[in-house]
Image: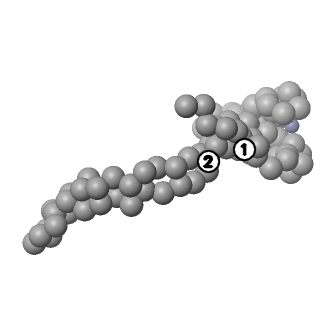
Amino acid sequence: MAVSMYRCQSCQQSVGPSIPSHLVTVATRWVEFPSRPQVHFVAHAAREKWRDDPGGEGAQVVRQQRMCPTCAKRAPPATRVRRSR
Ligand SMILES: [Zn+2]
């Protein structure tokens, strides 16, 4: 197994191999997907083989940082960024 040291992306300290790292989400964006009719193929359906995708919305990860346990514990909640398109 590889010895996995890492540098904390928050405090920039080099962290030893026995200390766990935490992948912390620091930025998210809110994404909406429109419904898409007739896109899911249902192989064994007698009729209505093509079904709708209902669409939906949710938070999408924009940026994550590898952090040491100390920084991960005091990391602020992820900021919500505006959609760029
Ligand atoms: Zn740190």
Q: How is the image coloured?
A: one colour
Ligand 1 quadrant? top right
Quadrant containing the N terminus is top right
Which structural element holds mark 2?
strand
Residue at 88% across / 32% down in the picture? 11
Q: CA distance from mark 2 to mark 1?
A: 7 Å
Residue at horizontal 55 percent and vertical 31 percent from the top = 85
Disc 1 target residue: 80
- Report x, y in % for residue 35: 38, 55
* Callout 2–callout 1 Cβ contact below 8 Å: yes
Three-letter amino acid code of the residue under disc 2: Trp
For mark 1, give the secondary structure.
strand
Residue nearest the observer in this picture, 62 or 34: 34
Q: Is residue 20 visible?
A: no
Image height of 47 relative to 8, above or below: below
Q: Position of residue 60 (x, y in %)?
A: 59, 46
Q: Residues within 10 Å of mark 1 (few under 14, many from 20)?
A: some
Residue holding disc 2:
30
What crowding class fits label 2: few (fewer than 14 Cα within 10 Å), some (14-19), or many (20 or more)? some
Mark 2 or mark 1: whose residue is earlier in sequence: 2
